[in-house]
Amino acid sequence: MTTRYVGRPLRRSEDRRLLTGRALFVDDVQLHGMLHVAFLRSEHAHARLRGVDVAAARRRPGVVAVYTAADLGDYWQPGPLLVPPPPIPGLVFHPCTLVPLARDKVRHVGEPIAMVVAESRYLAEDALGDIVADLDPLPAVVDLEAALAPGAPLIHEHLPSNVAAHVMQRKGDYTRARARADHVLQRRFRYDRGAAAAIENRAVVAQWDSHAEELTVWDTTQAPIPIRNGLAARLGLLQSQLRVVAPFVGGGFGPKIMMFYPEEVLLPWAAMRLGRPLKWTEDRQENFYATTQERGQIHDAELALTRDGRLLGVRDVFLHDTGAYDSYGLTVPINSQCTLLGQYRVPAYESEFTVVFTNKTLVTPVRGAGRQHGVFVMERLLDIAARELGLDRLEIRRRNLLRPDEFPHNHEILFQDSAPLVYDSGDYLPALEDAARAIDYDRFVREEQPRLRAAGRHVGVGIACYVEGTGIGPYEGARVTVEPGGMVRVATGVGTQGQGHFTAFAQIVAEVLGVDIARVHVVTGDTREFHWGTGTFASRGAVVAGTACHAAAVTVREKALDVAARVLDVSRDTLVLEGGRVRVRDGPAAGIALGELALKANPLRGAVRPGTEPGLEATAYFGPDRGSTASGVHAMIVEVDPETAMVRIQRYVVVHDCGRVINPLLLEGQIQGGVAHGIGNAFYEQLVYDEGGQLLNASLMDYLLPTALDVPRVEMHHRETVSPLNPLGLKGVGEAGAIPAGAVFAQAVEDALSDHGIEIREIPLSPNRLFELIAERER
Amino acid sequence: MEQRVAISVTVNGTRHDRSVEPRLLLSDFLRQDLGLTGTHVGCEHGVCGACTVLLDGEAVRSCLMLAAQADGHDLMTVEGLAPAAGELHPLQAAFHEAHGLQCGFCTPGFLMTLVPFLREHPDPTEPEIREALSGNLCRCTGYQGIVDAAALAARRAREGGP
């Protein structure tokens, strides 16, 4: 038998470097002669920029250069549109992409106006105080509905309104479905902004080597290859003159996939002009203003169903806040639109959204990337419908879940990757029953809750289902090389931010090649190592890059067997590859080591046979037509203190199905972390903007991330419905934990407070907000 | 502004005599002047705990101290934790085994927070561990692996093994 690695909870090979402080993060890069950069950022949310006086800053000792938009010349141009919208009929989209430095207007607090380069960061920040930006404040556009009111101030004045996009997608005939319905309910739901809040802030280091004529950029990006390609085009360099390295990255969660941030285009440009390496590291306050954020949405949703709780149709009209620019396209609202359908059979769906410009920081995908909004709306509608129809919350879900014989299931609308929204596989009802059993739903509702209520305690249970579209295209690649010493090197283009790719990809390759996993060395995120690919997003690393690693390893195995057959002069069919050696089946145990075969495949003299390639190396790509759909159920029990409105999570259960599991240890870590993020979204975290567009809580003192006291141990149960879309049967998992947390939290809290009769239609909650909801009800 | 302060600090057993700007943060001194980049900076306002180091054996936030204030003191950073190159401190080993890290950026701060805590609480309960960790932020793990790692390290220390 070959060594089995896939499916085992192996410890991570990358840990040692991280635990001993030797792992390289971007801010750790120190170069000879390096200069430091600081940015002057707008203090106004919306203002006309009349001029910038940098003369005093330029005179300050230690300052090497100061740049404004005017100094950039032709290099000043709006950034690219990252994701063009899918070809949805009737779609309206006005791209207004980020600019490197504000030129005539600022559109959100924190937008960069000037860049200072100095001998130290301290001096650069000193010089910021010398700069005078002549800003003429304009009324700020903050509220989504006010932004659309006639006469609202225009953020992009060449457009007729603050509408960035309008999209309508339909399935079936909702009007007819509604006419046939026994019961129709309408609600308005709100989901407000949050921060991704990776503990590592963004950073960029750029170094121009004038001898080699090569530019090296270290960047905390999730997408080093697209950064390289885009920068090369902007700077007029060959792609091969540019190396972008995303070394260890201290958490991504989405905003680090955004490109181009102003700093990413400015540092390389200035490094080339000045001939000295430059470093900029974002501070935490800048992170709150200048790194992209999670999404605010307002949904007006309507559910039509039969009296026995069968769904006939859903209509949802929502507003999506994109912030001051829309560089990332429509990925987030389309995720909301598509994910709303969840695990359910929805015969008719009408979904219309309007994307709105506001004077706030840009919105781009953050863990879940809008999926949680769709899940929140649908799950809340089902909860309310169950109550109004006198059905159990589980029962209404059971009646509407897709059955295994309905896969692949075509929802007849387009997903963010422009492919039709088709679920590849799934088995939903057993997962729901598993979750109900694990949380002991029936007994809790029948016995525990009444008993505790009688004792004056407010306990509640929530249970919510979700899907996660994962592992989308276009493609990723990998190169697998057997070195003469027998070590196996794997290079792939995706960046890594803690997911455990070094270990997971090694597991896949070690299993195919039958080698000890300790001999497999994985590199990621360095364009010099591998320069084809797109990046780490949409829970696709393991699925897409993992499958490419598998394909490359399979080709290397074939090559090894070919070489061995030739060397041993036997038929290939008689050979087996195991323990890092090829031997004749039933023959002597020794055989030939892979490293030795690699040498023989790369002779110094003699001939390599026509039609073969030297060495034991292969590059392979995997490009799925569409993503694989993971799914799961979250259940939780909470206790609420109605006096303080504090919520204590007593239990949290996750039943998860992400197809075949590569490493359960990594999987559980992803889920636990995702749930923590979701709990933060649900109860602790909210970016609070005032009517002037000022962010009122731009520090970790005021913006509360959940701590070890707030996140419970998540009880996990796994199911495996393998995906038919890739040879390993994988589905992604990176965002799953965060997606249904808001929905399940709202349901459980509402259940705990059922004697107060409140209906929760918004996330995030907070003790304050919950207290208000209780008080409103009591008035 | 050109005024400088002479300081003498011992870091991971090595003495350093330097002249620094009075305003230089201890975190920047460690990372930039001494090249000890294992200490990470996440917020520079004392909340996230990533920059935690030991000052005379006690956990402090190096972003909330000036380098000048460390004059005459003994510091330990994450680089000084392992007993020898190629080896891991028992707490580091426990983090590895219990999957107590993902991106690893906050990890040095958690390690340095736990070292004095476990010294003073050799047999901590889970709520005590959670309380001790509540001043450090992690966005990746949801804390469970870190809590388990701390408990594992404590148990091993009590049992007298690594």
Image (spheres, rainbow, N blue to C red):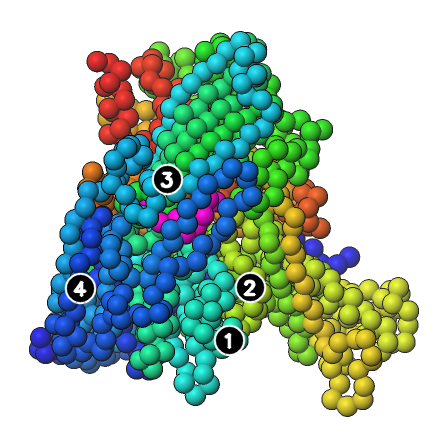
Confirm whether the magenta stretch covers residue A405: no
Look at the numbered disc 2 and give the secondary structure of its residue: loop
Cβ atoms under marks 4 and 2 closer than 8 Å: no
| Residue bounds of the magenta highlight | A323-332
**SS at badge 3:** strand
Q: Amino acid at mark 1?
A: Leu
Identified by mark 2, the residue type is Gly
Counting from the top left corner in percent of width and height, residue B82 is at: 40, 68
**Can the viewer see residue A589 in this picture?**
no
Query: Considering only order in the chain, which callout, 3 or 1, is on the residue closer to the N terminus?
Result: 3
Instruction: Classify mark 2: residues with Cα within 10 Å, few (<14), some (14-19) or many (20+).
Output: many
Residue closest to the eye, A139 or A58: A139
The residue beneath circle 1 is A238
| Residue at mark 4 | A52
Please give the name of the residue rendered at 23% of the width and 65% of the height, measured from the top-left corner: A114
Using the image, name the chain to which the residue with label 2 belongs.
A
- Residue at 44% of width from left, 37% of height from top? A166
